[in-house]
Structure formats: C-alpha cells, structure tokens
Amino acid sequence: MGQENKTQTWVSEFVLLGLSSDWETQVFLFLLVLTMYLVTLVGNVLILLLIRLDSRLHNPMYFFLSVLSFVDLCYANSIAPQMLAHLLSAQKSIPFYNCVLQLYTSLALGGSEFFLLGAMAYDRYVAVCHPLHYTVIMHGELCLGLAAGCLVAGFTNSLMETIITFRLPLCHNVINHFACETLAVLRLACVDVSFNKVMVAISGFLVIMLPCSLVLFSYGRIVITILHIHSTQGRSKAFGTCASHLTVVCMCFGATIFTYLGPRSTSSVEEEKMVALFYAVVAPMLNPLIYSLRNKEVMAALQKVLEKFRDKE
C-alpha cells in the first residue's frame, strides 16, 4: 500500500524515451518527421479547401473525405508537434495530464477514423450497387448522422479506455515510446493488467473489426456487382470510384491490426513504435495524396483553382 501511495504522488510527469537516443539519428528523424508533418498540413488543408470551393465535389463521397481530412489534421497535431520538440530536446518529459489528454485525443481520433472508413465503404457500396437511388439513400441528414455517429463512437470508446488505463498504480514514469500510448502506459503498472488487456482487446474489436466487417461486406457486394458489368469501361469506372478508398483502408486497418491484435514478442515494443509512427505521421500524409493523385475530380478541382489564381495575376 505504501508503494502504491508513493507511486501515485510521484508521477506528476512522464519521460518518453522516444525513437532513438543517438543524436544524429534524432536530427535525421526530426527533418523527416517535419517534412511529413508539413506535407500533412498542406495536403489535408488543400483537400478541405478544394471540396469547399468546387461545387462538383459537393456530394456524400467528398463530404466524408472532408471529415476524414479534418480528423487527420487533428490527429497529426496531437502527436507530431510534441514529437518534433522532443527529437531536439534532452528533456523528453510530458506532464501527467498532458499525457492523459494526448492518449485520449489520439485514441478518439484514431477510432473515429476507422468508423469513418466504414461509413465511406458503405457510401461506395450504395454508389456502385444502387446508383439510381444513390442521392435518395445518401441524403444530407444521413451523411451528417453517420459522420456524427463515427465521432461519438470514437470519443466514447477512447474515454472508457483512457479512464481504466490511468486508474492503475504505476511503478515508474518512464514510457518506452515517443507518445502516450495505451500499451506503453500499461507496461508501467505495478499490478496485474489482465483486465485492461481484455478491455483493450474488446475496444480493438469494436473499433477495428466492426468497421472492417462493414468494409468487407461492402466491397464483397461491390465486387459481385462489378463482375456482372459486361463492358470493360463500366468495370473500370466502377472500380475507379473505390480504388482510393480501398488503398487507404488496406493501409490504415493493416497497420493497426498488426499493432493491437498481432502476436506479442520481446521485439514487439520497437515494432509497435514503428507502426505507431507510420499511423501517426505517415498515414495522415498519404491519405490526401492518395485521394488527390488517384482521383480525376480532385485533380480537376485543383487545376480549376490554379487557373483562377493565374487569371488574377
């Protein structure tokens, strides 16, 4: 009991070990992460502006894309600025309540993104399998409801996981990670964390497997529909509307399933860091690139905006 009380009063801040203790490696990582962070900011803000300015992009598919870009912006800002500061700092500490807030926001935004990808898969299913009824089914109120539901589900799940994580008595305050992350914080506990691991597994099932199941169902129906299209041009067009979303789905779900549902080993801590880095910094950068470079409508909207600026000059 004495040890527990001492631990609870002692942990006023956490020390993050980060990705590397080598100075040259940290400088290299700083430049790399800074570049990706800036591309993330520019890419996602550009997506939001294009969808706002071009009336041709005012449809359910791009509404969900705009929400996804906003979530990516928020997620990147919850992790990257602190990571950049710590890469050039000898003192890699974070106050206790800042750590709680970071864990909560990153989990909430990450969970919301998975639910959004599920909603986007349903949108593509309706567009391909029920094209004549698309605008009737995917009306404005439904789109707003789905987006709000995704955010509420993500933030509610995160609140539960954050509370049960930080109620544990901690033995020390050194987190072997570059950010406050559930599994890394659980390793600091002085008590048995079997219950927490069960809750993380349940949380992972709800946040990852349920949207993933919706994605699999939607794309299963889409594939069946495409196979019944006789013309090559028709098949290509139907698949083209889903290609960008399917790429992002494989990238995001694959990385997170590996992190939270994959087998554990003695080297899994470093593997978790790499996957977490990919999801926190790389994925938010790639999402707007994938949706813009692989999407003719977005590229056309970008060209239109650039032409307007040239005409003003």
Image: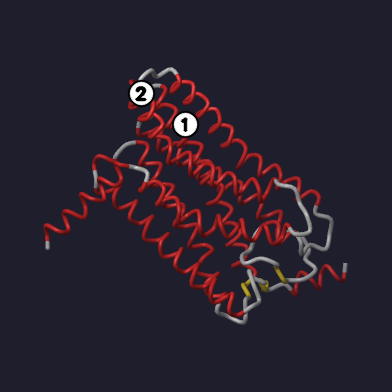
* Residue 312 placement (x, y as % from top left): 12, 60
- Secondary structure found at label 1: helix
Instruction: Look at the image and tell me in which quarter the N terminus lies.
Output: bottom right
Q: Which mark is residue 135?
A: none
Judged from this view, the residue extending furthest toward the right is 1
Quarter-of-image position of residue 165: bottom right
- Amino acid type at circle 1 is Tyr
Q: Which is nearer the eye, 55 or 312? A: 312
Quarter-of-image position of residue 125: top left
Q: Which residue is mark 1?
A: 122
Query: Which residue is rendered at x = 48% and y = 36% of the image?
Result: 119
* Residue 291 placement (x, y as % from top left): 39, 46
* Residue 178 placement (x, y as % from top left): 62, 67
Circle 2 packing at 10 Å, graded few (<14), some (14-19), many (20+), is few
- Secondary structure found at label 2: helix
- Amino acid type at circle 2 is Pro
**82 sits to left or right of 288:** right
Disc nearer the start of the sequence (1/2): 1
In this rendering, the answer to whether 59 lies above or below 218 is below
Q: Which residue is mark 2?
A: 131
Q: Which is nearer the eye, 113 or 23? A: 23
Query: Which residue is rendered at x = 47% and y = 69% of the image?
Result: 34
In this rendering, the answer to whether 228 lies above or below 66 is above
Q: Which is nearer the eye, 235 or 268? A: 235
* Residue 198 placement (x, y as % from top left): 76, 45
How far apart are labels 1 and 2 at the CA level?
Answer: 13 Å
Query: Which residue is rendered at x = 53% and y = 74% of the image?
Result: 28
Query: Which residue is rendered at x = 26% and y = 50% of the image?
Result: 302
How many numbered marks appear? 2
Instruction: Look at the image and tell me in which quarter the C terminus lies.
Output: bottom left
Q: Are marks 1 and 2 in contact (CB under 8 Å)?
A: no
Circle 1 packing at 10 Å, graded few (<14), some (14-19), many (20+), is some
